[in-house]
Amino acid sequence: GSGVYIDSLKNKYEGAWLDDKENGAGKYTDAKGNVYEGTWTNGELKGYITLRYRNKNLYEGEYNQGIRGKGKFTYADGSVYTGNFAKNKRSGYGEMSYHFGLTFKGNWVSNEIEGQGDFFETSSQKKLASGIWKTEKSKEGDLILLNSDGYMVCYYANKDLYFGQSANLLP
């Protein structure tokens, strides 16, 4: 059958049931306000899901035992990552179109750009730089990406953007 279950922590499941377990299409809203939609098997959410986070982020893709797989993650600021995840972090090949107008296509390690990749202007898809990249972060919260050929991308906490050669900050 189908029904609604609300536990003592205010987590709520609405959907199909079989043998007193979530089984089939359903929607789970946790006490924090995150909403999971997909297919349950014997009480476990698996396969392709949609996960709407309370902070307005959105994940659409593979999911198994609480872990994101290959999918698309749309951030509240408008940035979009499409690619692989490992332990719920961007890992392996992925593409990130940043809200500030640049797109990175390449390798990720533990949510950070690391390794071979290319930067493009998002609107025109014009390639701006290629190489081996490494992510750095400053104490002020600035995002700084450096490559092996001396290019850098700096997205500052104050929302300024710099892309170009760096004579002083070579990796």
Image (tube, rainbow, N blue to C red):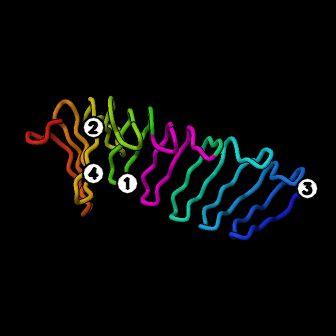
Secondary element at image label 4:
strand
Q: Find the distance from the CA under tag 4 to the CA under tag 1.
A: 13 Å
Q: Report helix, strand or loop for mark 2.
A: strand
Earlier sequence position, callout 1 versus callout 3 = 3
Label 1 sits on a secondary structure element that is loop
Check disc 1 and report the residue beneath it: 99
Q: Main secondary structure of the magenta part?
A: strand
Question: In this view of the protein, which residue sits in the foreground, 64 or 121?
Answer: 64
Tell me which corner region of the image, top left, top right, bottom left or bottom right, holds residue 152. top left
User: Mark 3 Cα within 10 Å, few/some/many (few <14, many 20+)?
Assistant: few
Left or right for 79, reference 53? left
Residue depth check, mark 4 versus mark 1: number of the one nearer the observer: 4
Residue at the location (63% across, 43% down)? Answer: 63
Which amino acid type is shown beneath numbered disc 2? Lys
Q: Which residue is mark 3?
A: 1
Considering only order in the chain, which callout, 3 or 2, is on the residue closer to the N terminus? 3
Position in image of residue 22 (x %, y %): 80, 52
Residue 123: image location, x then y, percent: 36, 46
What separation in Å lies between label 1 and label 2 (alpha carbons)? Answer: 20 Å
Earlier residue among tags 1 and 2: 1
Counting residues from the start of the chain, the first of labels 4 and 2 encountered is 2
Q: CA distance from mark 1 to mark 3?
A: 44 Å
Residue 129 belongs to magenta span: no
Q: Residues within 10 Å of mark 1 (few under 14, many from 20)?
A: some
Q: Residue at x 71, y 50 (%)?
A: 38
What residue type is disc 4 on?
Answer: Leu
